[in-house]
Amino acid sequence: MLILTTVLTTGALTLTACGSRDDDSQSSGGGDTQTVVIGVDAPLTGDLSALGLGIKNSADLAVKTANADKTAPGIKFELQALDDQAQPSVGQQNSTKFIGNKDVLGVVGPLNSGVAQSMQKPLNDAGLTQVSPANTGTELTQGNDWKTGDKKRPYKTYFRTSTTDAIQGAFAANYLFDKAKVKQVYLIDDQKPYGAGLAASFKATFTELGGKIAGTDHINPDDRDFNSVVTKVKSSGAKAVYYGGEYPAGAPLSQQLKDSVKIPLMGGDGMYSADFISLNKKAEGDIATSVGKPVEELDSAKKFIADYKTAGYKDAYEAYGGGTYDATWSIIEAVKAVAAENDGKLPDDARAKVLDAMSKVKFDGVTGPVSFDEYGDTTNTMMTAYQVTSGKWASKLSEAVK
């Protein structure tokens, strides 16, 4: 497991209860064990299930690690994973289920920023902590007016271990303009909150750098025939396409693009999945950015990678595995701190106390130092650019973005 350098420990978490008792006690003192449930919301079925299952498994590993190491003495963590199908309405329904389970003290997820928008208010109204390892929509933490400099945190219960699209879009634009030497781009988005926001952020920085937007268009993320937009791209003279969206549509868009014009497609973390390559026979040369540094290149992630393999999960941890483990562990740390301040037991107002403790959470995690700023954003702004090389994503540049 991880070695934490802070006030809190390293761990993993599953939440079940603020104060419920379990007769098959695991507490070192021989007393009753309290169960804490950690909810997980992600797309466990459907087109984005590769990413969602990686989130579920990584949270599960954190919970099992915390229990095995007795990270929080007298507390047994459990996981409650719900499938949101990448649909905001389902995510909102899942929020209600988590809120109704008094043993849930924190929720990890979701994957999609659009789903997060539907979950934030009900979880906030219930005072239930939420930590996403994947949402990058800037407005989720800084409000709808963040672009004007008027940053206001909409929901005090919402945190994330992934950085924002304001940072990701700017990083992508700088990489394409300065490193890839592409000066003329065709901009496409899928009209969803994540894709549209990311594309807008990319455009702002790319044009500031002197780049030219050769054309813009929108697609339906459920479509798979993109010949009409490809025709526009071809006639525009663009040297690359920047796509704000996710891999289920991005992969066929890229393949159809290469069938017509030999230019690369670039996207954000919603593209960074092995499934993008398996769905796209012409992915070679395409580029994606993703949050954090590749866990395979981090000494801090060696234990996580080894434990994940030993656990035998059939699905890969994918892009958000390390961030999910850290998101889950942050809740575990908060629960541990609350219990420690209450003679080893969880108080009746455990949800409120866990929320208060989250702002003080600080530890060395899988992805590096973990802590949150005044908006609930991660203080880790590391970004990485990847390119499909010999049929695999290869990291090209990692740097912290200010």
Image (cartoon, rainbow, N blue to C red):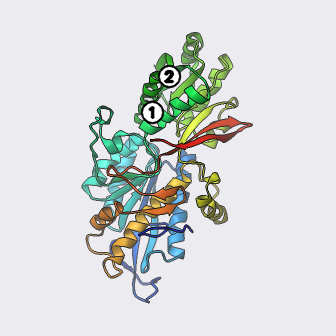
Where residue 367 sits, quadrant-wise, is bottom right
Please rate how many residues cluster around mark 2, counting C-alpha atoms within 10 Å: few if below 14, some from 14 to 19, many from 20: many
Depth check, front residue: 160 or 253: 160
Q: Is residue 393 left or right of residue 86?
A: right
- Residue found 32% across the figure and 42% down from its top: 142
Residue at x-position 45% and y-position 38% = 167
Could you give the CA–CA distance between mark 2 and mark 1, rounded to whole angstroms?
11 Å
**Vertical side of 350 occupied by 315: above or below:** above
The number of numbered badges drawn on the structure is: 2
**Residue 355 screen position, x and y as percent:** 31, 62
Q: Is residue 8 left or right of residue 395?
A: left
The residue beneath circle 2 is 187
Kindly indicate the quadrant of the structure image that contains residue 165: top left
Query: Which quadrant of the view contains residue 224?
Result: top right
Q: Residue furthest bottom?
A: 30
Q: Is residue 213 visible?
A: yes
The secondary element bearing badge 1 is classed as helix
